[in-house]
Amino acid sequence: MESFYTIQGEGKFQGHAAYFIRLGGCDVGCHWCDVKESWPIDTHPIKTVKELVEEASAQPGKIVVITGGEPLMHDLNPLTEALHEAGFRTHIETSGVAKEITGVWDWVCFSPKKFKEPNSDIFPLVNELKVIIYHPSDLSWAQTWTTHLPENSLWLMQPEWSKQLDMNPLIVDFVKQSPRWQISVQTHKFLQIP
Ligand SMILES: C[S@@+](CC[C@H](N)C(=O)[O-])C[C@H]1O[C@@H](n2cnc3c(N)ncnc32)[C@H](O)[C@@H]1O
Ligand SMILES: Nc1nc2[nH]cc(C(=O)O)c2c(=O)[nH]1
Ligand code: SF4
Ligand SMILES: [Mg+2]
């Protein structure tokens, strides 16, 4: 759909320069999704792996974040292998909804959704769980995922952007009581960058 060089706004790598590749196509249907224009799979420009790697290589940053849409709708082996060969770290933002988990990853951010079940094959690969908190009931729903994940995974709660005034106090209280969890906020939106 698009690619751009910016600052990772969310999660463990928040604040780091990163080249984002946003792949078109998603059928998960989150009603609060902040990139609904990414949902169609066939209306976006098509680029080759070589073009994407060349464009990323024009920037000094060494992290590439593959997002979407739902990037795992695509076979990500060729792209991630080429990015590794070019010396990049490969990071993914995914709901885990996929027929197959493809790609070679240095960092996997798994953001499960109530609207569609993820492929459980992703569980052992997860570095960072990032649950979006839209409603108070999402606090307990978030906790249901942790038992599936590697012991050293990070557990993050991120307020849904339009609900942050209501959700932030709940998330803050929760993390103070359950310090295994951390807060992620969408810092790029405060910085007014892509
Ligand atoms: C747009 S999604 C694309 C990647 C993948 N489809 C997914 O959902 O993980 C990128 C990240 O933004 C989060 N996100 C999307 N809309 C949001 C919103 N309105 N408020 C907070 N986070 C949001 C998603 O949960 C995900 O962690
Ligand atoms: N700056 C910035 N950081 C991000 N982290 C995850 C994003 C995403 O949409 O996947 C995102 C995004 O869209 N912009
Ligand atoms: S899975 Fe990700 S891209 Fe798809 S609708 Fe949900 S937030 Fe948007
Ligand atoms: Mg985003």
Image (cartoon, helix red, strand yellow):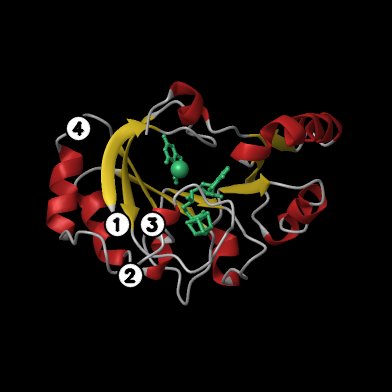
Which label sits on residue 80? 1
Q: Residue furthest right?
A: 177
Mark 1 against mark 3, which lies toward the viewer? 3
Mark 1 or mark 3: whose residue is earlier in sequence:
3
Q: Residue flagged by tag 1: what amino acid is it?
A: Thr
Which label sits on residue 38? 3
How many numbered callouts? Answer: 4
Tag 4–tag 1 contact (CB < 8 Å): no
Q: Which SS class for mark 4?
A: loop
Q: Which SS class for mark 2?
A: loop
Judge left or right: residue 173 versus residue 63: right
Q: Residue at x 29, y 57 (%)?
A: 80
Mark 3 against mark 4, which lies toward the viewer? 3
* Alpha carbons under labels 2 and 1: distance apart: 10 Å
> Does mark 3's beta carbon lie closer than 8 Å to ligand 3?
yes
Q: Residue flagged by tag 2: what amino acid is it?
A: Asp
Q: Residue at x 61, y 34 (%)?
A: 184
Q: Which SS class for mark 1?
A: helix
Mark 2 or mark 1: whose residue is earlier in sequence:
2
* Alpha carbons under labels 3 and 4: distance apart: 24 Å
Mark 4 or mark 1: whose residue is earlier in sequence:
4
